Image (cartoon, rainbow, N blue to C red):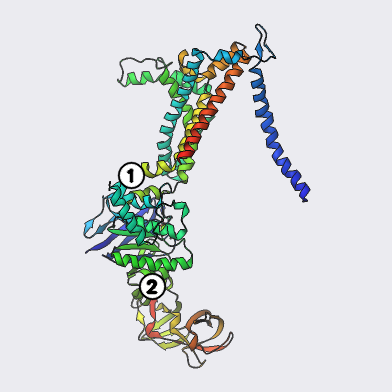
Amino acid sequence: MTSAERVGSSILTAAIPAAMLICFFVLPFSIMVAVSFFERVQGAFFEPAFVLSNYERFLSPFFGSVLATSLLLAAGASVVSVAVAYPFAWMLVQFRRRGQTLILVFVLAVLSLSEVIIGFAWSSLLSRTAGIGNLLAFAGLVDAPRSYTPGLAALMLGLCYLGLPYAVLVIYPALSRLDPAIPEAARMLGASPLRAFLGTVVPLSRNTISGALILVFVFSLGAYLLPQLLGRPQHWTLSVHITDQAIFQSNLPFAAAMAVLFLMISLLLVGVSMLLGRQRS
Amino acid sequence: MSGLVVRNVSKAFGAFEALTGVSIEISSGHLACLLGPSGCGKTTLLRIVAGLDEPSNGAVYLDGQKLSGVPAHRREFGMVFQSLALFPHLSVAENIAYPLAIRGASRKTRASRVREMLELVRLQGLGKRRIHQLSGGQRQRVAIARGLALKPRLFLLDEPLSALDAKLREHMQVELRQLQQRLGITTILVTHDQREAMTLADHVIVMDNGKALQSGPPLEIYRHPVNSFVAEFIGRTNLIPCRRRGDRLIVLGSEVHAGSVADQTTVGQQETVLSVRPEHVRLCAADKGVLTGAITFVRDLGSEIEVSIAVGDIEILSSMPASSFGGSGVGDRVGVAIEFSQCNLLSRDQR
Ligand SMILES: Nc1ncnc2c1ncn2[C@@H]1O[C@H](COP(=O)(O)OP(=O)(O)OP(=O)(O)O)[C@@H](O)[C@H]1O
Ligand SMILES: [Mg+2]
């Protein structure tokens, strides 16, 4: 291969991902940013312009509280998911190889279910007529079956169910790569098993934990079906409102403006948390 | 007895028996080496002594106290893992002070103990370093210092020196031995390097296939191995098949009088193996030796010369000081003289 050919082929290998990035990410995003400044036409769609009214409309107490709800819900879901996934992954690592694979396959199978299926499944499981309330009543734990949905708890449950496999997916490899002799060494030095775990395994996987938190957080921000299926209107997230504006109100410029703002705020939060993590380690 | 006693310990992983009825005794203050080929169960035994694994059968006693049911963190043993298992998120000083921090020692006690330990392993001034900023030998020392920080009742080391290059390893062996003798801590060291065992140990335990084959002082095992596996594993040896006829031996077709051979075989057994160390094989004129053969290889190591001689269809290795080598070359026919009083008759290895 001549050096000119080599340069040519390396340009080619760089060009393909770049082209894909431009085609599938930069271009659509630019269009969305452009649309967010367009003017809506009542009864029609929109026409090109440069107005800031879409962004101005967002600066209201109503959308402020929607934004706060979205962020809090996502943060809550990510904390709960990781809090469950972390000990779960640790126990998984202690299992035999074959058992580990089997359980992982089950956990990851959840990923193949769509948000729609998960939402409807939970809403019937939590309902009064067909749900686990009947089981509890049957077992004599409650007097009469009642519905647990819609509500904040039901919504959180759904979001965590969705986020958990992702958290396991991030945490499990890191824990299984950790030298099992490290917590054992702590035990030999006098630490009880729990103390050894908290003193070595947890601090050593801090980056993994923050990675899993960020992933589930970002992922939960995008959920727009679960809040409608399992939550009350006051739990509707920004994603729900964006969908609503774009599809049902046909106000694409406003939806685009909200999406752009939402993206910026999420990126900002993720960036800040990564920066904090870097500084501490 | 004071010291460590392992009584009839077995360990099964599912259907696989990693240890079968292992019994050993180590006097207090001694350094014992667990020696054996890879996969023979050394780590498994060490982990059972440490309390990290439970034996399927049998028990471990320290100074007469039965250790069953005492969890690892209450045994007050020091341990150096094969991977060292230093804490990468802590500094060298914090690693060494970890057992003291667990027990809530004051900052001052910790600092002075860390200083003392760093001095002991000759790493003064490196307390603030991170683990990844140390060389392999320095990490080794940190692991040893951490294991010794609380003056453990028993010190366990799992192939602690295997990752080091030959020169550093020999150096660390001597240091480790001096340190152990100075502190007088009962120590078990796992190794599969017989030279290391001979250098360090008061007591060697040879293991194979989950069993303790022989245990005793290194020279004792070297001189009187119980079977051909031990003879081959501890030092080098020529294993020459032979037959017994009355008080005479038939070695490769030559009948020799071998009344003084140390006999470790079962009486009545006719087919046996004669173990002859290379230093007990001498070359002589072709008609003078008990055997004759042709030289196939001469390895001149400077201070020492090793000669391989083909006798019949087996190869016999002889080693001698360079000064007593007569200067024969490859292809020469020579006589082979054997100092039978130094040799051992062993039962054939049934493996
Ligand atoms: N947790 C386990 N489950 C099943 N088998 C095991 C387990 N741990 C060890 N073994 C088996 O037990 C045998 C002894 O293992 P062990 O680790 O004690 O060997 P070793 O003598 O320390 O070897 P090496 O010198 O290679 O470290 C091996 O055959 C190993 O495969
Ligand atoms: Mg081992």
Up/down of B110 relative to A81, above or below: below
Residue B201: percent from left, percent from top: 35, 69
Q: Chain of mark 2?
A: B
At mark 1, the secondary structure is helix
Image quarter for ligand 2:
bottom left
Residue A222: percent from left, percent from top: 54, 24
Q: Which mark is residue A126?
A: none
Q: Which mark is residue A193?
A: 1
At mark 2, the secondary structure is loop
- Residue at 43% x, 45% y: name it: A96
Residue nearest the observer in this picture, A151 or B89:
B89
Q: Amino acid at mark 1?
A: Pro
Q: Which residue is mark 2?
A: B227
* Image-based side of B244 in relation to A249, left or right: left
Marks 1/2: CA–CA distance: 43 Å
Residue A150, quarter of picture: top left
- Residue at 68% x, 26% y: name it: A27
* Image-based side of B96 in relation to A102, left or right: left
